Every structure is written in C-alpha cells, then in structure tokens.
Amino acid sequence: MIGWGLRRLIQSLLVILLMTLVVFIGLNAVGNPMDILVGEDLNQVERLQAIAHLGLDKPLWEQYLIFLKGAVHGNLGQSFVYHEDAMRLILQRLPATFELAFSALFLAVVIGVPLGMFAGTYPDHPLSRLMMACSIVGFSLPAFWVALMMIMLFSIKLGWLPASGRGDTREWLGVQWSWLTLDGLQHLLLPALNLALFKISLVLRLTRAGVREVLPQEFVKFARAKGLSPMRVMCMHVMRNTMIPLVTVLAMELGSTLAYAVVTESIFSWPGAGKLILDSINTLDRPVVVAYLMVVVVIFVVLNLIVDGLYYVLDPRVRSEASR
C-alpha cells in the first residue's frame, strides 16, 4: 500500500512539473501584455523601464526558472493589473467557485443517481424512457442559453429567485459562504442548477448503464437467492459496483466544473475565480492566468489521487495488484 501510494505521488509531482512548463511557455507565446498595460504616451525609455520592472526583459528560460523558484515557496508572481500576489487573488475568489461547483455536483448526485437506479432497474417503464429522452436534451442545450432562459423565467417572469450576485454570506472556518443564509441559497440555486444540468444527465445515463450491467451478474442473483431484501441488494451490491466508474467521472466533472465555470459565473455575476480569470485574459495578466491554471492542474492531480484511493477501497482487484 505504501509503495503504491508513493508511486502515485511521484507520478503526480512529475505531471505538475511538466504542466508548469507547458502552461508557462504556452502563455508567454500568446500576445504581449505591454501592448495593453502601457499607454501610448510613454517614450521608449519609459517603456523599457516598465518592461524591466515586470521582469519581461529576461530570456524565457530565465523567467521560467524564476517562476519555478517562486512556486516552490508558494509565490506565483504579482498581478500586472491589481499589483497583488496572484495566488492571493485566486484564493480570495476560489471559495465562491468551490461553493458553486460542489453545489452543482451535489445536485447531480442527489438527482441523477436515484433516477439512474430507477431507469436501470425498470428500463421499459414509460417514466424511464422519458428520463432518458430528457437526459439527451440536457446534453444538447448550451449552458449560456439555459442560464438566460432561467433568468427570464425564474427571475424576470416569476420573480422567485435573484438573477445575479452571491447574496448574503456568513463566515465559517474563516471563509464567507452563501449556503449558510437563506438569501445566499436563493442566489446560489440558479447558477448551481445551470451547472448541474449536464452533469445530472451524465450521472443518470452512467448509473443506468452500470445498473443494467451489474444486475445480471451471478453475485446479484446469489444475494437474492439468500433472501436479501431488494433494497439491500440494490444498495449493498448493485450500487457499490456501479459507483466504481461513477467515482472517476464525478471526480473529473468536479475538476472541469471548477475550471470551466467561467460562463455561468459571468452570466450570473457570481464573484468566483472564473470571472477573475476571464478579466485577466482580456488584460493579458500573465501571473494571474498562470496561477489559476496551476491551481486547476493541482486540483485535477489531487482528484486523480483521491480517485485512485477510492478505487483501492472499492475494487479488490486494485488491492491485489498493489500488493503484488
């Protein structure tokens, strides 16, 4: 177990190191921030001084080594626009994005898994056919259009829910959270549901496919022959084996939600990291963009490690392979 965990950890660190190189070189190949940040009224001497102040006068390899040295100490550079530590800016906005992403994933699991279990157990039921048809619609509709339709229906026409902002928050563990207040929950519901629609459809179809695959297995028939109740068979045998591929998908979907919540945050004016990165891309604020991308990379790597650990717990085959 320890050797298996160390191998996974070393692989993860190598992936992070490789991604720092890809992100840094790729970002520096796109545009010149001086064209946006520096006014046209500066003369050549003042322009060169500004370039040197931002450290852009050094060769690319030297800039990368300086970036690596700072990254080891948790310093990913200072924002060109905000003149603050880039990592601090990201961490200030990240809790709002985490809250939105986890809320969307929670809705996807709470809604998608029970519906998928029902659709897999009773595939020919009219309700199951209706759910599968609705899941195709959930895959097909673009998120930005759904968000606008939600605002028009629930905010403008019915007036049930607010259309933008985060609402009232309450501090817990040193961080402000919306779900701890009623007004915050009302502001959170629409963007979370918009993010969750695609994931509900995905979880529903994956759960249904897993149930249809597991139900004919011999161990399920044996469990029923022992006289176990249908609920116990579904929860202890069918659902546990269905969760193995679902865990991987949910972990990756969580990472993608954190990385690509830009559209939802922009439409609903949600003050998360996605809106910050969009503004930073428009101004070519390289340190903020690099810091955000590296945070996303680390999140994906950590999620992969967690998935590997869950596989070790859920799948006996992984444990036997690790022991060998």
Image: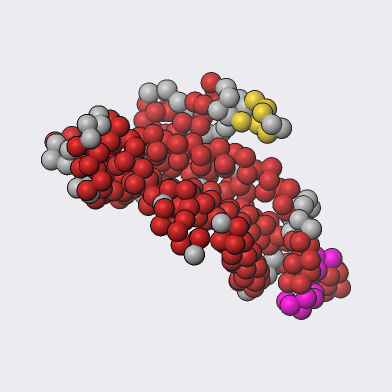
Q: Position of residue 124 (x, y in %)?
A: 13, 40
Q: Residue at x 50, y 60 (%)?
A: 323
Foreground residue, 30 or 222? 222
- Determine if residue 288 is in view: yes
The kind of secondary structure the magenta stretch mainly shows is: loop
| Residue 90, placed above or below residue 317 | above
Colour scheme shown: secondary structure
For this view, does 156 lie left or right of residue 46?
left
Looking at the rendering, which quadrant does residue 34 occupy? bottom right
- Does residue 61 belong to the magenta stretch? yes
Q: Position of residue 196 (x, y in %)?
A: 41, 41
- Which part of the image, by quadrant, shows the N terminus? bottom right
Q: How many marks?
A: 0
Q: Residue at x 68, y 46 (%)?
A: 91
Q: Residue at x 25, y 46 (%)?
A: 219
Q: Residue at x 79, y 66 (%)?
A: 69
Foreground residue, 158 or 59? 59
| Residue 47, placed above or below residue 132 | below
- Does residue 97 belong to the magenta stretch? no
Q: Start and end of the magenta stretch?
A: 53-62
- Determine if residue 31 is in view: no
| Residue 258, placed above or below residue 191 | below
Q: Position of residue 61 (x, y in %)?
A: 74, 77
For this view, does 176 lie left or right of residue 152?
right
Q: Position of residue 297 (x, y in %)?
A: 59, 59
